[in-house]
Image (cartoon, helix red, strand yellow):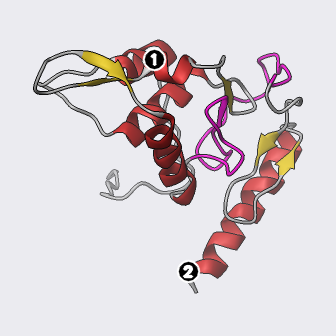
């Protein structure tokens, strides 16, 4: 009996990220491993998001968590809001964050984030609900119940395939 090995994954692929490790990686800024601000924001969102994909942030927390390194002085300081909003906008265009993401709440769409429903879902203080974002340019809010999740993923996939046609 032979085992078939493929170089490309097939079907739905799952991986686990450790939230605390993502937050630590997002906070880290040094000369050895400089990470792009957009990637650091994505890591922070991945580390803080709950089951609905919301990562609510207190006012100013994003600036406190993601410091930038001044290469000439070696000092750490906060990014300006313009830089942070630009990086969030980049992630929204890449469909890695929902269009309603802001400095107060980073929302991971279901197309990249799914914690399942075994965890208690709490309302997001910024958005006032616990709805998940289905993803894609025509995404929408929906109840992250398992049947709703499957339908949203199916719809997001069919919209993506139409977009590529």
- Taking the spot 51% from the left edge, 49% from the top edge, the residue there is 91
Place of residue 41 in the rendered image (x, y in percent of width and height, measured from the top left): 47, 33
Q: Nearer the viewer, residue 7 or 14?
A: 14
The residue identified by callout 2 is 164
Disc on the earlier residue, 2 or 1: 1
- Taking the spot 20% from the left edge, 25% from the top edge, the residue there is 70
Place of residue 16 in the rendered image (x, y in percent of width and height, measured from the top left): 50, 27
Residue 18 appears anywhere in the view: no
Disc 2 versus disc 1: distance between alpha carbons? 37 Å
Q: Secondary structure at mark 2?
A: helix
Q: Is residue 117 magenta?
A: yes
Q: Is residue 108 magenta?
A: yes
Q: Is residue 30 left or right of residue 118?
A: left
Q: Is residue 133 above or below residue 84?
A: below
Q: Nearer the viewer, residue 3 or 76?
A: 76
- Taking the spot 75% from the left edge, 32% from the top edge, the residue there is 52
Q: What is the magenta range?
A: 97-125
Q: Picture quarter containing residue 37?
A: top left
Q: Secondary structure at mark 1?
A: helix
- Quadrant of the drawing holding the C terminus: bottom right
Place of residue 59 in the rendered image (x, y in percent of width and height, measured from the top left): 65, 19
The residue identified by callout 1 is 65
Q: Is residue 120 above or below residue 8?
A: above
């Amino acid at each position: 009996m032979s085992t078939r090995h493929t170089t490309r994954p097939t079907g739905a692929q799952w991986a686990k990220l450790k939230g605390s490790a993502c937050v630590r990686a997002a906070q880290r800024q040094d000369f050895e491993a400089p990470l792009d601000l957009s990637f650091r924001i994505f890591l922070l969102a991945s580390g803080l998001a709950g089951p609905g994909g919301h990562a609510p942030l207190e006012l100013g927390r994003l600036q406190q968590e993601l410091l930038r390194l001044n290469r000439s002085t070696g000092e750490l300081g906060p990014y300006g809001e313009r830089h942070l909003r630009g990086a969030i906008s980049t992630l929204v265009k890449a469909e890695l964050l929902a269009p309603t993401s802001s400095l107060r709440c980073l929302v991971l769409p279901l197309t990249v984030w799914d914690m399942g429903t075994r965890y208690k879902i709490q309302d997001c203080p910024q958005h006032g609900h616990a709805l998940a974002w289905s993803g894609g340019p025509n995404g929408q809010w929906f109840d992250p119940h398992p049947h709703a999740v499957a339908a949203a993923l199916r719809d997001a996939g069919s919209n993506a395939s139409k977009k590529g046609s």
